[in-house]
Amino acid sequence: MANAKRIAPNILVTGTPGVGKSTLCQKLVELTGLRWIEISKVAKENECIEEWDHEYQCGVLDEDKLMDGLEDTMANGGNIVDYHSCEFFPERWFDIVFVLRVDNTILYDRLTSRGYIGRKLEDNIDCEIFQTILEEAQSSYKKEIVHELQNRNLEDLENNLQRICLWLQQWFE
Ligand SMILES: Nc1ncnc2c1ncn2[C@@H]1O[C@H](COP(=O)(O)OP(=O)(O)O)[C@@H](O)[C@H]1O
């Protein structure tokens, strides 16, 4: 079994930028004590950025270097991985995958208040409208471990936290 040696499960939280991954992960860490792995941050700290994409104002990942660096941590389990893409992670790493979703009008407001404009703003809105990350997750992981979670407001957030904590409790049992 892929998770035979894990002391705790590995959770992937993914979705378009602005859907609320960091907010959810921060709360999950407080509730569960699991380790939060923010891929963008880890990539920067470990020099896993190959180049800078000027149009999108973001780094292009050296995926192989990043994966090698995370392998031992992931093998032990107990991690919540947070990233806006998911197809390049090894499938065996994750016990469950959550894809956060929001209505595009809500996402628009969140991204404009973050300072996104022009192409970067439009492409991220399109990414959500065309459910690109959900489809990416469904084609990269077993369908039964991929869960779509609406994350429009604080009530959704609360429900999502409860649902994930319940799943975790069952995993430990
Ligand atoms: N469930 C929610 N309800 C209302 N606002 C939220 C919710 N989740 C996140 N936000 C807000 O949306 C913005 C983007 O959230 P963030 O967690 O940074 O998203 P991501 O990590 O996916 O880019 C932040 O301003 C955050 O406060």
Image (cartoon, rainbow, N blue to C red):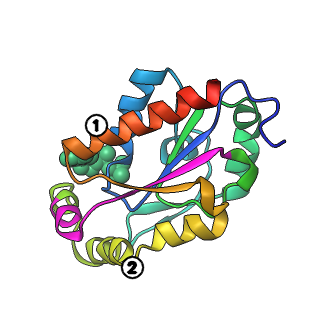
> Between 112 and 126, which is closer to the camera in this rendering?
126
Above or below: residue 140 compared with residue 163 = below
Depth check, mark 1 against mark 2: the one in front is 1
Relative image position of residue 118 (x, y in whole percent):
23, 77
For the residues bearing labels 1 and 2, Cβ distance under 8 angstroms: no
Q: Secondary structure at mark 2?
A: loop
Q: Secondary structure at mark 1?
A: helix
Q: Which residues are magenta?
A: 94-109
Above or below: residue 43 compared with residue 77 = below
Relative image position of residue 31 (x, y in whole percent):
41, 22
Dot 1, how many residues are within 10 Å of its Cα: few (below 14), some (14-19), or many (20+)?
few
- The amino acid on which the numbered mark 1 sits, given as a three-letter code, is Glu
Instruction: Pick the quarter of the image with the C terminus.
Output: top right
Q: In the picture provided, is 168 more to the left or to the right than 3?
A: left
Q: Quadrant of residue 57?
A: bottom left
User: What residue appears at the point 62 percent right and 64 percent down from the top-left corner?
Assistant: 87
Q: Quadrant of residue 51?
A: bottom right
Above or below: residue 43 compared with residue 111 = above
Numbered badge on residue 158: 1
Instruction: Pick the quarter of the image with the N terminus.
Output: top right
Q: In the picture provided, is 93 more to the left or to the right than 49?
A: right
The magenta stretch spans residue 44: no
Relative image position of residue 19 (x, y in whole percent):
32, 55
> Between 82 and 60, which is closer to the camera in this rendering?
82
User: What residue appears at the point 67 percent right and 48 percent down from the top-left corner?
Assistant: 66
Q: In the picture provided, is 160 more to the left or to the right than 139?
A: left
User: What residue appears at the point 52 percent right and 61 percent down from the top-left corner?
Assistant: 85
Please name the residue that numbered disc 2 is placed on: 130
- The amino acid on which the numbered mark 2 sits, given as a three-letter code, is Phe
> Between 93 and 53, which is closer to the camera in this rendering?
93
Dot 2, how many residues are within 10 Å of its Cα: few (below 14), some (14-19), or many (20+)?
few
